[in-house]
Image (spheres, rainbow, N blue to C red):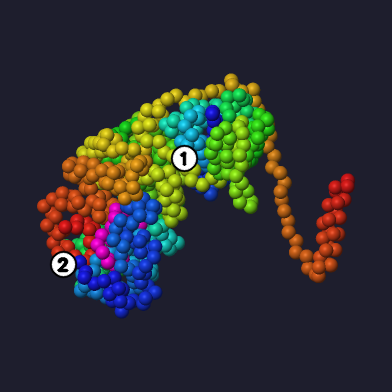
Amino acid sequence: MTTLSKEAIIEGLKKIVPGDRIVSEGQALKESSVDRFRKYESICGVWTQPIPAAIVYANSTEEIAKILTFANENKINVVPRNGASATEGGLETVVENSIVLDGSNMKKIIKIDPVNMQATCECGVSLQELDDQCRAMGLTTGHSPQSKPLAQMGGLVATRSTGQFSTLYGGIEDMVIGLEAVFPGGQITRIKNIPRRAAGPDIRHVVIGNEGTLCYITEVTVKLFPYYPDNNEFMGYVLDSMKLGFEILREVMVAGYKPSIARLYDPEDGAYHFSHFANNRCVLIFMSEGPKPIAEATATAIKEIVAKHPECEAVDPMYIQRWFEHLNWDPAKVAEEREEIAQTQNIGHTTEVSIVWSEIAGLYEAVMKRVRAEVPDLTMLGGHSSHSYMNGTNIYFMYYYNLVDIKPEEEISKYHMPIKSIIVEETIKRGGSMCHHHGVGKHRSHWIKEEYGSSYYILETLKQSFDPNGIMNKGSIFPVK
Amino acid sequence: MNVLVCFKAVPDLDSLHEQDWRSGDGSRPETRFVKTIINPLDESALELALKLRDNNGDIGLTAMTIGDEKADAILKTLLALRFDEVKRLSVSSAPLFNPEAVAAVVAEQAGGNYDLIIMGGQSADGANGATPLLVAEKLGWPCLTEVSALELNGGLITVESQCDDGCLRLEAKPPLVLAIGNAPSTYLRVPTLKDRMSLGKRPVEILALNDVSESGSKLTPLTLTVDDHSRSAEIIDGGAAEKAAVIWRDHVQPWLGKRRR
């Protein structure tokens, strides 16, 4: 990588942006060497990753182009960042003297267009802000990840995020119409906003989900939908079997219905959220929304499908509605979690994967069995399916453990990675994907070739073509050689 | 040393939706749709008791609550955390606004069996702040309030107690009642799945309150009235002498008159 010193990098950056937008010392620099994957290390103030040379706050696409050109010419690693809500190490600076390129100053909502039903905004616009403004106009982005109060649009697109209503609206890849991105050579590229085209491959997908390894996303245009909150209908059931729950989810999906939420929690995960009514049983949740006739028809059909299974016991829908209103993570919740971890020495993480219907129950059982048997000090192991499709679903494994006799930097090697490894291995073995919606980051890149198989050729060629000097977010998606 | 920790299972009021602060009949908030948690100050009491045992070894720990089955998941957690005994005095719903009767039950249960009773200074829902003091009064024991830390030194208990000017460090000889205040670093520890599977399967002792306590029948208040705390404001113009005259004439004199009558 670069032979430039930290001082030379900062001098170079100062020729592009004013010094007051360059952070080159202090706690913020240390905190920018990691993301929530290493939350325990950061809580303990232990910094195991190389500290970046600088954080640069860019104000425009042109500045980003100049910074990337400078970095590319000098082979400086650049970690693109927006809302900093990443959980998989995507923001870790794994080589010395990296630049963290932060776009959170670029927070202009350029246009909310109710005629063409699309909204255009800069990369640093918070999804919460965008969606609140849309809702005030009777519209919605339909995107609602748990990180909605924290995440920003550029990061959401870069990590191929999905939201709690994805079963109806799709993931971010279904929402992005057009975008602007800057490549390492400083090329500013714009993909225009059109309903559809058959003019070659869909190049949006080179950018969506690139996790900052190919380019920097500076502007995004997403679809809008009419917002009908008054038509929302919630349904909740308790049952004893995850296998049956998966079967019901499948029945609803393959029958052609599109609830906005279709979720199944196992007893452990259910107890975490629904202790006031689940009574250690599985919990099955649906929400229908949209224009009233569609929302009503969807709800009626789901109730009929579930009614064919007398093992499912309906609960007051208000339980589900109230739960849903408290689901998102805001900065206060993140701070509270850090305090609780510090006090209890008990920490939780997640790994989310996807697989076809015929394999989901087997995958769930295998992971639960192996993790329980192989990992010490577990205090909670559970999972839920939260995003379903015509051909399969995801499973979001949740795990908490007590930290026993370890140094802060050993948390990952003693607990987190052994659990993640089991989940990834069991998923890939069955033909599933090791990443449903958090991205690869730096801690699932070890398995990227197994994930892609022979199609890794396509992925690797993208990297070689667009980032030949390997300056874009080293270690993410593509393992450090 | 035998320690009794009293706790209450309460609705997580922080999660209560704005609309649920008023229920249909207007008598109390609608708490059905939020999770049940350990009353936060009682959670500190439970963790402080566990820390006391961590540091001193041979201490018997009993946890007790009065309430319905919503508390049972918490009791199982306490079993998994190696509480020696856990018990629930069963009533149809957790008592509210009757610290006198709750204290009578606790005192009856505790009498002669324990050296130390630890409980949160007040509950999140009732918030009377009276129960620990009333328990102490009924037992004739001292009560230390706003406790944030405790340790055992020989036969004495040393506690830190928060007060307006700082922190008092007090030493007292059991038997004692300790009312826990805002205590730092007292989130309840988390049992492992293994301990949940083994220790947590031990039976929770559930006793019908009316069978074990003479005071149990008095738990439900006969009537509840709200004190009139209404206030009003008035802006008085003029100089200081004029303002004083108005206050004297319109407010102080009538009030004195009422008191004399």
Assign a secondary structure to mark 1.
Answer: loop
Q: Which amino acid type corresponds to the residue marked 2 in the rendered image?
A: Pro
Residue A468, label in figure: 2
State how far apart marks 1 and 2 are (Cα).
Answer: 52 Å
Q: Is residue A353 left or right of residue B217?
A: left
Q: Position of residue A474 (x, y in %)?
A: 22, 61
Residue matched to label 1: B188
Q: Secondary structure at mark 2?
A: loop
Disc 2 chain ID: A
Displayed quadrant of residue A66: bottom left
Horizontal relation, residue B97 to residue A401: left or right: right
Q: Nearer the viewer, residue A268 or A29?
A: A29
Q: Amino acid at mark 1?
A: Leu
Residue A346 occupies quadrant: top left
Within 10 Å of the Cα at label 1, are there few (<14), some (14-19), or many (20+) other Cα atoms?
Answer: many
Indicate yes or no whether the magenta region holds residue A93: yes
Residue plotted at (36% across, 77% down): A18
Name the residue rendered at 23%, 51% in the picture: A444
Bounds of the magenta segment: A85-100
Residue in front for this viewpoint, B209 or A422: A422
Look at the image and tell me whether residue B203 can be seen: yes
